[in-house]
Image: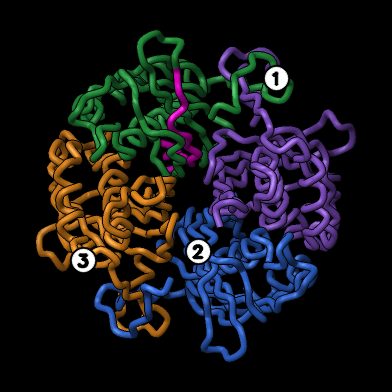
Chain colours: A orange, B blue, C purple, D green
Amino acid sequence: MQASCYNALSSHTLTTMVHQPLNPSFAAEVQRSFARQSIMQLIGAELGRVEPGIVEITIPYRSELTQQNGYLHAGIVTTIADSACGYAAYSLMPAGSEVLSVEFKVNLLRPAKGDKFLARAEVIKPGKTLTVVKADVFGISGAEADQTLVASMLGTMFCISKNRE
Amino acid sequence: MQASCYNALSSHTLTTMVHQPLNPSFAAEVQRSFARQSIMQLIGAELGRVEPGIVEITIPYRSELTQQNGYLHAGIVTTIADSACGYAAYSLMPAGSEVLSVEFKVNLLRPAKGDKFLARAEVIKPGKTLTVVKADVFGISGAEADQTLVASMLGTMFCISKNRE
Amino acid sequence: MQASCYNALSSHTLTTMVHQPLNPSFAAEVQRSFARQSIMQLIGAELGRVEPGIVEITIPYRSELTQQNGYLHAGIVTTIADSACGYAAYSLMPAGSEVLSVEFKVNLLRPAKGDKFLARAEVIKPGKTLTVVKADVFGISGAEADQTLVASMLGTMFCISKNRE
Amino acid sequence: MQASCYNALSSHTLTTMVHQPLNPSFAAEVQRSFARQSIMQLIGAELGRVEPGIVEITIPYRSELTQQNGYLHAGIVTTIADSACGYAAYSLMPAGSEVLSVEFKVNLLRPAKGDKFLARAEVIKPGKTLTVVKADVFGISGAEADQTLVASMLGTMFCISKNRE
């Protein structure tokens, strides 16, 4: 990818959505639910940033999470991206809701190398029933600034509303 | 979607990729290939912005392009998004290449309403064989500023290199 | 693809789902809605088989539907696959429902060549709100028996229920 | 899903592809590579059926693999489906190849409940560079016959050929 570099000022992605949460306790709810996802402990995942419509999850590299070449397995890349997407959607749902993944698509862009990995999810379309979320997963080596995009997800999350049942 | 508004200054999407084209005639090549896509004439599509890794295609609303409720059919939304993705990828390929779509996924976010529609594609990972591209499709009503995101695509394009055959 | 041939007796795909329609007029409803999709007339599409959970749509090859190499444009392949998926889902919905596409993913497997094209959609998971559908698109040349799989779709359809609004 | 039942005789899915392997040692190669995927040991996955173009992987239910409701996490469902798809593709590649996941899309059809889970992958389009594979993941409770489809994947695998590098 020698033909590319990063530029901090680009006109066409300057706008992003700012979401207002419907549940004032959204951050505590996300933390509580995350703590109940046993798989997160097994793989060493930690919850990072939790803002309305934006959630980050990180995991350190561990050899027991790898595929045949020693890279993070695409399924584990997906695991943190999916949970980040689910909680980004959940952060905008009304109190008493539950969130489920409907579907996601993942493009594996580069070998998942790094000392640790960061999944950053962001809601692109909130909705009463369905919320569409994208996530990027970065491999991070050495300094925090050295982030390489290794995967992109585009997915749909479902809101089970307490009142609806 | 009352819970959302747009903010012009957000830290997490300020960086975008700037690509260097390998083919100095990329813009002319994109135009030439676009002119050969008969379907573009049938649906009234026009090529807009053509920059390295970024291509835009527009179509006016016409009732003959609609589904049962009078919205632009998801397949036509996909048609302009796919061509925009293909040409965004093509703009970064070496001279003499051909581009083919491998796969794409589309989330239909809102009913495709508008006086016209704009598909904006951007390469997120160029590659010798495979290039990953995302596209957003907007419905535009009245003033240009009134753009509503109606669909997002994440897809993979294939480079058939002249030298490789 | 010399390494492959078709075998009419394989144990692992012998089972398929048989669905019971909730709306006894499902076939008439599908036909009525299809007739209102103006895009279907524009591209020359015809509704074929309509059974509970299964719908087929065909189009003849026409040069005005093509991409730069003279093959059917991936967006038109998608257009008939998406409508077939939507109506396959719709055929299982209760009377008074409306159907919308949530998302789909398409793999373009081979160049879309043929005298005509057939999209065959089949529901793999019906649901009150969301129905998951797959579709295969075949290029057909000469005799009907000569069908080549050119694309596969996996998508999600949304039911807007009259009673729910 | 009361409206559906399974039928063992359906005309439209009776044909499946039979693939001829290019590498006579494909089964041993798949086993060797699987043994090197450390993540498979961590989650307790086992390789089942390995045939040309078809691979199965199973895991037992374990509470440490779950999401917040006690179901198998979608990322783990994806992990076994992705490996099964990769090895189904790999089984048809020439000796000396390596396989990488390009992308996949997963529809989560039902809560991933069961005593164990089976991912069954099948190549739908082999190719020199790209192979398209689908996988179904079943939850199995009690008797083997009680299989519930919980997820479907459609993905693309990349062949890195020894000779090509």
Measured from the top left, where is residue A44 in percent x and y?
12, 42
Numbered disc in front, either 3 or 1: 3
- Kindly indicate whether the residue at mark 1 contacts the one at mark 3 (C-beta within 8 angstroms): no
| Residue under label 1 | D10
SS under mark 1: loop
- Kindly indicate whether the residue at mark 1 contacts the one at mark 2 (C-beta within 8 angstroms): no
Pointer 1 local density, CA inside 10 Å: few below 14, some 14–19, many at least 20: some
Question: Which residue in the rendered view is the most extreme toward the left?
Answer: A142
Measured from the top left, where is residue C43 in percent x and y?
82, 58
Q: CA distance from mark 2 to mark 3?
A: 29 Å
- Verify whether residue D152 appears in magenta: yes
In this rendering, is residue B101 above or below B22?
above
Q: What residue do we see at 81% from left, 51% from top? A: C32
- Verify whether residue C78 appears in magenta: no
The residue nearer to you, when weighing C22 against A31, is C22
Instruction: Give residue A24's mark.
Output: 3
Type of residue at label 2? Ser
Q: What residue do we see at 32% from left, 72% from top? A: A19
Pointer 3 local density, CA inside 10 Å: few below 14, some 14–19, many at least 20: some
Task: Indicate the quadrant where residue D37 lies.
Answer: top left
